[in-house]
Each structure stands twice: as structure tokens, then as C-alpha cells.
């Protein structure tokens, strides 16, 4: 409670985090792990594709040494990509959990992308067409983490776009805005308020009649 005419506005209690936000972030933990496993299952395909491209470049540049250590290069590249993308996803998850709407929308967009990727994966799974590529076929078990990751992404998309999630992020934005305004305002002063220059700290704020604790 504040005195009449005070620029400070009481800040309501911190908005309660809904289950939809918690569920969306938890599902994204599963998405990250499953997507890493899915990419790792295609290592033989990625390695063969890299070797083929490097051989073409080596022939044009007359540098046969370019094809050396292809396996190590592919491993390092995949690890770096996994770390960078996981870090980006982790940052979005953190800010989404804290109620930042921009992070929720970006994480929802990523969830939608993986959901579309799931649809293409299912079409490819039941497709009877044969590939003419000379690259090796990825292992069949690699489709399991891909599909499960897509299902988790779909669940995260539904949870993050739920109206409870939207309302929570909106309430958190208003909550942060009001706290920021109160920090920028000068402390209340006048009859009934403690002297800001007084060395005595932590005294109760009372009205001029000394009846109500206004702090």
C-alpha cells in the first residue's frame, strides 16, 4: 500500500507459471536429446556425402590431402553443431520459462519446423520409391528418435501456443514493466514517510497518525 499521490504503484504478486509452460520446456529437453540421437544415426550417410564432396573439390584443386581425416572432420562438425544448437535452444527455453513472449514464439516456431519435418519423415517412411543415390542408407532404427522427437515437438508446440502460456507471458511482461517503473521512481517522501537521508534503516512506514504499516 502506498500513500496518496505517491508515484509508486503496488506490484502484484509474481504471476504463477502455468503447467503448459513447464510441459513445453520439458518436452524440449526430450526434443534436443532425440534430435542428437537421430543425427548421430545418420553418421555413415553424412560421412559418405562429405567424402564425395571433398573428392570432387580435391580433383579440381589437385589437392588429394583434402580427403584426409574426413571422419574426424565430420565428428567435430557434428559436435560443434550440436553444442551451438543446444545452447540456442537452452537459451530460448530459459527465457520462455521466465515468461518472455519473444522466446516462447521462437521456440514455438522451432517446434512447428520440427513438426513439419516429422510429417516429411513419415511420408518417406511409408514411401515405396527407391533412391538412386550412391550414398549408403541410414539405419532403420534412426527413424525412431526422429519420429519421437517430432512428436515431442508437436506436443511442445501445442503447450507453448496454449492460451495459458500466452496469458502468462503477457502477465510477466506487465509485472516486469511495473517493477522497472517503480525502480526508476524516486522513493516516497513527506509526512508519514521515513527520511531517505536518515541513517536508521528498516523502520516501518506508517501513516501520519502512526496507525497503519504502509510498507
Image: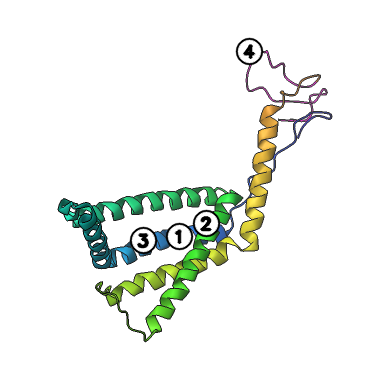
Disc marking residue 199:
4
Quarter location, residue 52: bottom left
Residue in the picture at 66% in, 29% down: 183
Dot in front, 4 or 1: 1
Q: Is residue 15 left or right of residue 45?
A: right
Q: Residues within 10 Å of mark 4 (few under 14, many from 20)?
A: few
Which region is colored magenta? 192-215
N-terminal of the pair, mark 4 or mark 3, is 3
Q: Position of residue 75 (x, y in %)?
A: 24, 55
N-terminal of the pair, mark 4 or mark 1, is 1
Front-most of residues 129 and 178: 129
The residue under label 2 is 107
Query: What is the total number of numbered labels drawn onto the structure image?
Result: 4
Front-most of residues 76 and 187: 76
Question: Main SS of the magenta segment?
Answer: loop
The residue under label 3 is 33
Amino acid at each position: 500500500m502506498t500513500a496518496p499521490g505517491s508515484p509508486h504503484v503496488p506490484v502484484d504478486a509474481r504471476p504463477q507459471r502455468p503447467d503448459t509452460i513447464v510441459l513445453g520446456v520439458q518436452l524440449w529437453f526430450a526434443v534436443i536429446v532425440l534430435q542428437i540421437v537421430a543425427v548421430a544415426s545418420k553418421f555413415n550417410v553424412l560421412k559418405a556425402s562429405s567424402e564425395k564432396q571433398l573428392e570432387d573439390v580435391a580433383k579440381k584443386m589437385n589437392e588429394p590431402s583434402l580427403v584426409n581425416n574426413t571422419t574426424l572432420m565430420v565428428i567435430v562438425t557434428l559436435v560443434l553443431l550440436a553444442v551451438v544448437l543446444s545452447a540456442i535452444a537452452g537459451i530460448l527455453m530459459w527465457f520462455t520459462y521466465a515468461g518472455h513472449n519473444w522466446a516462447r514464439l521462437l521456440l514455438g516456431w522451432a517446434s512447428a519446423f520440427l513438426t513439419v519435418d516429422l510429417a516429411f519423415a513419415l511420408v518417406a517412411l511409408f514411401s515405396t520409391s527407391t533412391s538412386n543415390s550412391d550414398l549408403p542408407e541410414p539405419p532403420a532404427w534412426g527413424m525412431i528418435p526422429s519420429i519421437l522427437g517430432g512428436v515431442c515437438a508437436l506436443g511442445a508446440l501445442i503447450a507453448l501456443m496454449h492460451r495459458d502460456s500466452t496469458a502468462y507471458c503477457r502477465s510477466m511482461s506487465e509485472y516486469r514493466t511495473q517493477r522497472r517503473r517503480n525502480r526508476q521512481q524516486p522513493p516516497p517522501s513527506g509526512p508519514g514517510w521515513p527520511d531517505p537521508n536518515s541513517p536508521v534503516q528498516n523502520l516501518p512506514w506508517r501513516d501520519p497518525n502512526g496507525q497503519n504499516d504502509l510498507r
